Structure formats: structure tokens, C-alpha cells
Image (spheres, rainbow, N blue to C red):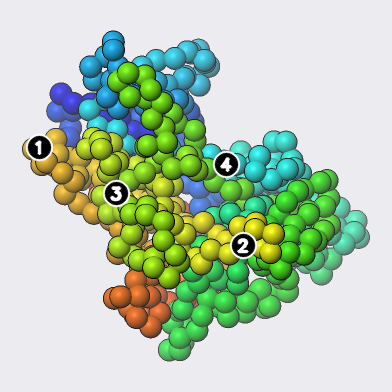
Amino acid sequence: MSKILILGAGISGHTVARYLNKWLGKQHEVIVVSPNPKWNWIPSNIWVGVGQMTEADVTFDLAEVYGKIGVKFCQAKGLSINPEGNAERSKPFITVEYTVADKAGQLEEIEYDFLVNATGPKLNFAATEGLGPDHGHTVSVCTASHAIEANHKLQATIDTMRGGKHCTFVIGTGHGMCTCQGAAFEYIYNVDHVLREAGVRDQARIIWLSNEYELGDFGMGGVHIQRGGYITNGKTFAESLMVERGVEWITRAHTTKVEAGKIHYKTLDGKVHELEFDFSMLIPPFAGVGLKAYDKAGTDITSQIFAPNGFMRVDADYTPRPYLEWSAKDWPRTYQTPGYRNIFAVGIAFAPPHLISKPMQSTNGTPINPAPPRTGMPSAAMAKAVAMSIRDMLNGAEKPTHTASMAEMGAACVASTGSSLFKGTAATMTVYPVVPDFEKFPTYGRDMDLTFGEIGLAGHWMKYLLHHAFIYQAKMRPGWSVMPD
């Protein structure tokens, strides 16, 4: 019997766990390690953050679900990897620190035959002084608990506005190297929707603050989409949405510091600015969770396995080269870690070979450009491919058998406002492939038959139904495996 150890129980880690459990049965042991006791459907944190859903609507207990299917769940935080074992252990192992109350702080070494790093990101609020809900002056929707606090502050601000005060809302990215513009993009429209429902929208100034070079970049180098039979660029699409709703925007911005009620930021032209606010939700930059790695002799080999940002190296081409020489072929396909056939990294945990958007720096050398998105549909696709490869390698295959390159997969984004079936709207956009391939699609880098955008109630219904469908699937209810990921 082999042990498959999965670090992380988000979209990627949970996808690997449920498919391996289905395919392997009791022949092998599947172990999931996560410091969080609950699974969270993160896309719907947006609705929690405006009071349209509760924490119970977007989470469930992992131990309960895994207990029913025979997957071992360990509520702990991964600290280090010994991929060659050490003087005392011949097998590879990881060291974890328990976070569950009755074992909090205890360390344990867990051996494995295959390891999947699906830890997701460290929310690096500390990269910007004063950023974040814990030690700063802004709110977040990155976790369910963050979203609850965001809604409390939002509702308090709305109450203040009912008393006649005009308020400024600033939503976007809190650092020049942030990713996940999509979450902030959706949140800003939900805030606009809630303010209108409360009858105070005319007292609000809403501002989008972003590190994008232009609106509609989303860390994907921008996008051209089909709409109404015509091809338009993502900049026009995004700008039209904001103009229609009276939202202002500031792009090419790096937030340097947040004080109570004031954001300091610099722009690509080197100018320094200040922006006062009453309510602000800024997404933090992401980093690796800080795993260390050691060889058999105990020598630190972290820099060999992980990139400087803490994300794990995989089968990508990390050779430094100028932007114009970047290629879709640089991106990983199997997510196997070089030098270790039994280690994989999926979702946000893997290190991209480079940006997708063109790298930009301010006149004083500050990088201001979005990092590549790796969440949602791409996370699930690469997780399922890795699960299939591990299944086949356990059955005798010498190397990974399945691939899921972001240069060969599409993604859909539905930015919806409100959770009612009868009120609300959505901007729906599909992109294929996520990483543009100008060799295959010379004009736009993407297949224009599969890259399009629409606005309307139908997309809103789709987002609402997807919320319930994906939670049903994640709970491994009857028929879950025939549902698309």
C-alpha cells in the first residue's frame, strides 16, 4: 500500500483527493493535510462580503466529508519536506505542525510515496504597510472570515450614509505585484449593487485601484473578446462596465502604504499620490506558504525546489529571457517537480515560469504588473490531470500520463452582482487559452470562437447555479464524478 499525501484542501488539493479516493479505493492511503478545518468555495466569498450569503453557505467541514469516504484528514500546517528521507528515515516525509485545538503546536513526521503540494498562497498583507484586516486598515474577501468582517464594515458604512454622509469606496489591488483582479473586479460591482439596493448609491464615490496597465488585463496580458458578432478588447469591455455604473478607475498603480482612511500609491510615471477612503477592500499579493526542503544529509535545498517567491518549481522552462521571447511552451504540462518523480505542485502552489502580462516598472524601478492567475477552473483541471498521472504511476507508468497546460486550457469567469434569481446581472467571459499562444493563434493569441464576453441576467443565473453545483460536487454527493470540474 502506498501513501499519497496532499498538502492543502482548497480547490486543487480537494480535487486531487476526491478523484484519487474514487480511483484507488482502499488499495492505497490518501492523506490530506490542511491547517483549515473547513473547505471554502472562495468565489462565493464575494457574496458573503456584501451580506448576500453566510459563512455556512460557502463552507463545510472537511473531516466529516473525508471521514465518510476513508480519506485521512490531518488538521495541520506543513513546515518542511525531506524528499530523500534522512539519516533516521529511508522514506521521504514531511514535517507538520498541528493546528487542531487538542494538538496545537505538536510536530509530526508523515511519510509518503507521492506528494502533491496544493497549499495555495500565503496572503502577503505584510508586503504593503497597513494593508489587510488583521493589522491594517483595509478589508479582504480572500477567506470566509475575512468576508464576514468586510460585510460588517460595509453595512456600518451604509448606515453612516443613511445619515446623510457621502463616502468613498476604494476596491482593487493592494500591491504592484498582485494577482486575482477578478475577485476584486466582482466585488466592486457587488458593492455598487448593494449601495443601490440600500438607496445610497448617489452618496458614494466608487474607485477601482489596480496594478493593471489597462483595465481588462486581469494578469492575462489583456484579452480580445467576441461580443455581439464583433471583436473588441478587454479594455473597452471593462471600461464600459465601469462607465455604466459610475465607477472611476486608477490603473498602473502600486499601493505603498495604507493609513486609517488614506491610501498612498505610486504610478508607472513615478508620481506619488494619496487617496482618501471610508471603506476599502484591496487584494494582497500572494507568496508561497514558506515550506522548507532538506536533503538526506539535512542540508537546506529549499532554493532548488522552490522559486524565490516560495512557489514550487515544476516542469516549466524557468530560463530567464526577454519578454518578446516568452512562449506558451514555457508553461508546465505535468506539474511534476524536477528531480523528484513523486512530487507535484498544483494550483497557486506551482511557480509560473514568468508573467503573462508584459512586465512594467515605474521610473524608479518598482515593478507594477499583475501576476498570473492560477485559480478556479485551471486549478481543478491541473489537479485532475495530476490525480490521473499518480493513479497510472501507481499502476506501473514510469512518468506522468496526463497534462493540463494553461496554454492549452480555457477558463470562464462570471462576475455576478447579487445572489437573488430575480435581481442582479453578470459579466460573463470565457478565454481560450489562458496563456496566449501566438504561434497557434497569430492575431490575438487566443481562439476567438472560444473567447467571448456577455452581460446579462443569464450569466447571473449561471453563477448562482454553479455555486450550488460545485459545493454539491465538493461534498462528493451522488453523481459528483460525472459533473464537470
Circle 4 — which element? Answer: strand
The answer to which of marks 3 and 4 sits earlier in the sequence is 4
**Are discs 3 and 4 less than 8 Å apart at CB?**
no
Which numbered disc flags the more N-terminal residue, 4 or 1? 4
* Residue at the image position 54 percent from the left and 69 percent from the top: 217
The secondary structure type at the circle numbered 1 is loop
Query: Label 2 to label 3, Cα distance in Å?
Result: 28 Å
Whether residue 76 is situated above or below residue 158 in the rendered picture: above
Q: Name the mark on residue 315.
A: 3
Sequence-wise first label, 2 or 1:
2
Identify the mark nearer the N-term, 3 or 1. Answer: 3
Q: Which residue is at the front of the view, 58 or 397?
A: 397
Residue pointed to by mark 2: 361
Q: Is residue 40 left or right of residue 125?
A: left
Q: Mark 4 sits on what residue?
A: 123
Q: Are marks 4 and 1 in contact (CB under 8 Å)?
A: no
Query: Eyeballing the image, is 145 above or below 466?
Result: above
Q: CA distance from mark 2 to mark 1?
A: 49 Å
Kindly indicate the quadrant of the structure image that contains residue 403. Answer: bottom left
- Which residue sits at x=57%, y=46%? 142
